Amino acid sequence: MARKKKTLTTGFGMPVDNDLNSVTAGVKGPVLMQDVHLVDKLAHFDRERIPERVVHAKGAGAYGYFEVTHDVTKYTRAKFLSQVGKQTEVFLRFSTVGGEKGSADSERDPRGFALKFYTEEGNYDMVGNNTPVFFIRDPLKFPDFIHTQKRNPATNLKDPDMFWDFLSLTPESIHQVTILFSDRGTPRSYRHMNGYSSHTFMWYNAKGEYCWVQLHFKTEQGIQNFDRQEAEHMRGSDPDCTTRDLFEAIEHGDYPSWRLEVQIMTPEQAQDYRFDPFDITKVWFHADFPPMDVGRLVLNRNPENYFAEVEQAAFSPGNFVPGIGPSPDKMLQGRLFSYHDTHRHRLGPNYHLLPVNAPKACEMQNYQRDGSMRLDNNGGGDPNYWPNSFGGPNPDPKAAPPPIDVSGMAARHAYELGDIDFEQAGALYSRVMSDEDRAHLIDNIVSHLSGAQKRLQLRQTALFFKANADYGERVAKGLGLKLDEVKRLAKMSQEERVRATAG
Ligand code: NDP
């Protein structure tokens, strides 16, 4: 069918007579201010950019559905998980973390895995990563950490000294560093990686009984990564390779899918577990908490407009539904504030009304009014206060999560660094990785860490040695460091090590 011819108009609907020639006084100009079409066109263009996300700036997204495959009603009363076979629409945004909006997709970096479920009880967001752990476990360190992953304030260059200085002063990062410098730090595509909640969350059932959970979305495409040489090559030859891969796969009907597994810990088990189960630098060992199947996620629809749907997509780990709640994880608590805050800055106070962010399977009803870019009818003539006697929406006490017991002295409590903080990096190196994984890990680290000052190389290599002696020895050899010096540093407390490498 022939497409109906459309008339070009201004933003206000007035037909435009000519879009090639500005209104000028005579053939040679100058241009006249009365050309309001020209002025409007230039002025809108001048304002096309919105602030880039401070992290996760470069991303790609798609729609799809989540289907429940196993009964989990014993653990959660979330309605979208209430029945085997039930499907819920989702939007998933993948991203790199540290790079700018135009950075290469194959950079070594964790990958974001931010998933929005449009449920009948409101939008539930799982704002995860492709790694089950994180570099730090206190949100107070987050801005500093991110600064070190970005550019040197003087040179505007990526800076291995900043990068390794911070990490070697933050030994709890060793587990995530080991994952990041394995080839999982350069996934071949967004389809070929897992997504993890990383944080612990609360699930609670209809009786108000709760448990702690960690979510794992396991790729059904299989894990595939670039090795260092391939990743470096792709940075030049196809910097948008994973964005392209996702779009083209969905366009061709090759829909990517993930299996959702959950690990479940009772409150009693959490009290006795041999480390803090809310510490995001650690996983719960599968042998202790075997993953259980929950459902399947499929992506089957590309967005129609990148800016409207992907750039303006806004996720928050604070978007819960009844049946799912936060845990005491300190990093999570920081993120509960920061995500909404950054979206208000980036998109404005009414960002939740944008189509990609608005609830789709239920109505939003509250007493928030006004603010810039209020896109809907702003509550019309309904009451704008509560309590009211005019039939306004009322809170529903049944939506309350169960109370949990928290107590303690208010203070800036430090995590005490112990051998347990090195154990999981060591387990990954010695028990999980293949010989080839280990060889690539060492090569990836040596190639990056060799750019840092020698004292930082020594301090960081001592941490690798503490995780596993062979791991530390091979990095030391690759960097040409004296093994005795690394061993001496590894024996010291972190404070002594920092003093010994102060420069
Ligand atoms: P298991 O030995 O039962 O399983 C190993 C896990 O490690 C698998 O889930 C596998 O994911 C994943 N894995 C394999 N290679 C890498 C890599 N290069 N980087 C990150 N993850 C990788 O696990 P355990 O529970 O006994 O834990 C042992 C170690 O495994 C942990 O210290 C941790 O580093 C890692 N791990 C553990 C997870 C957990 O939740 N327990 C989750 C992810 C990693 P896949 O099946 O997709 O290949």
Image (cartoon, helix red, strand yellow):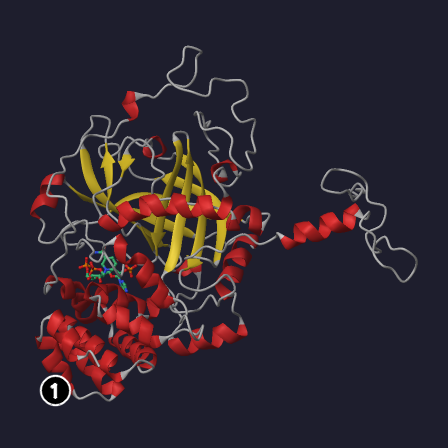
Q: Quadrant of the N terminus?
A: top right
- What's the residue at 14%, 40% (across, down)? 266
In-front residue for pair 199/213:
199
Q: How many marks are shown on the rendered structure?
A: 1
Q: Is residue 349 above or below residue 206?
A: below
Q: Is residue 12 above or below residue 36?
A: above
Which residue in the rendered view is the most extreme toward the right?
26
Image coordinates of residue 138 in percent, x first then y, are: 23, 54
Examine the image and state in which quarter residue 439 appears.
Answer: bottom left
Secondary element at image label 1: helix
Image coordinates of residue 394 in percent, x first then y, are: 37, 18
Which residue in the rendered view is the most extreme toward the top?
389
Image coordinates of residue 210 in percent, x first then y, are: 19, 34
In-front residue for pair 434/113:
113
Horizontal placement of 3 versus 378: left or right? right
Q: Is residue 358 above or below residue 228?
A: above
Q: From the Cβ of disc 1, is ligand 1 less than 8 Å away? A: no
Residue denoted by label 1: 484
Horizontal placement of 419 versus 34: left or right? left
In-front residue for pair 113/149:
149
- What's the residue at 41%, 51% (across, down)? 257
Q: Quadrant of the C terminus?
A: bottom left
Q: Is residue 271 above or below residue 285?
A: above
- What's the residue at 24%, 30% (across, down)? 401
- Ligand 1, by image quadrant, is bottom left
Please rate how many residues cluster around mark 1, counting C-alpha atoms within 10 Å: few if below 14, some from 14 to 19, many from 20. Answer: few
In-front residue for pair 188/168:
168
Image coordinates of residue 496 in percent, x first then y, are: 11, 74
Horizontal placement of 275 versus 391: left or right? left
Amino acid type indicated by mark 1: Asp
